[in-house]
Image (tube, helix red, strand yellow):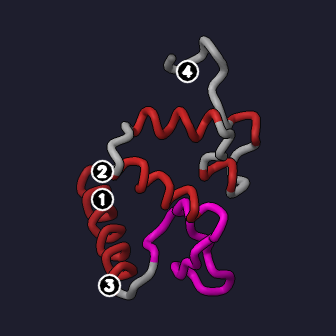
Amino acid sequence: MSALFLKGLSQKVRRGQAGSVRQGRNPGGDLYGYTPRKGKPGILDINPETSAVVTRIFEEYAAGTSPRAIAARLNAENVLPLAVASGMLPRSTETPRAGRGASE
């Protein structure tokens, strides 16, 4: 594709996303702590189960806990990442295997 076409496409996508935000809607993608409302594109409802995890992450970070330590605790407690919790990925992909990209 030509560079000019791609630049124009990029501008159109951004303009569309900005319009969605101005209308108070989510411009795309799933958000941890929210569930899409059926039949209402871009409208999100708070998910009580996963929103508690989001609140906890913010509270721990505000208390001075490092992001790495927060992630380690969530992994130790088997808190599912968004892609697994929402069913986008199978559970087998939720955590890396030892020695295969997992940081120790």
Label 1 belongs to which residue?
Answer: 5
**Label 3 or label 1, whichever comes before in sequence order:** 1
Label 4 belongs to which residue?
Answer: 102
**Label 3 or label 2, whichever comes before in sequence order:** 2
Between circles 4 and 3, the one closer to the viewer is: 4
Q: Residues within 10 Å of mark 2 (few under 14, many from 20)?
A: few
Q: Give the residue displayed 69% in from the left and 35% down from the top.
A: 93
Rendered location of residue 24, percent (x, y): 40, 84
* Drawn side of residue 91 relative to residue 62, left or right: right
- Outermost residue on the right side: it is 91
- Give the SS element for disc 4: loop
Q: Give the residue displayed 39% in from the left and 80% down from the top.
A: 20
**Label 4 or label 3, whichever comes before in sequence order:** 3
Label 2 belongs to which residue?
Answer: 2
Q: Nearer the viewer, residue 93 or 1?
A: 93
- Give the SS element for disc 2: loop
**Label 4 or label 2, whichever comes before in sequence order:** 2
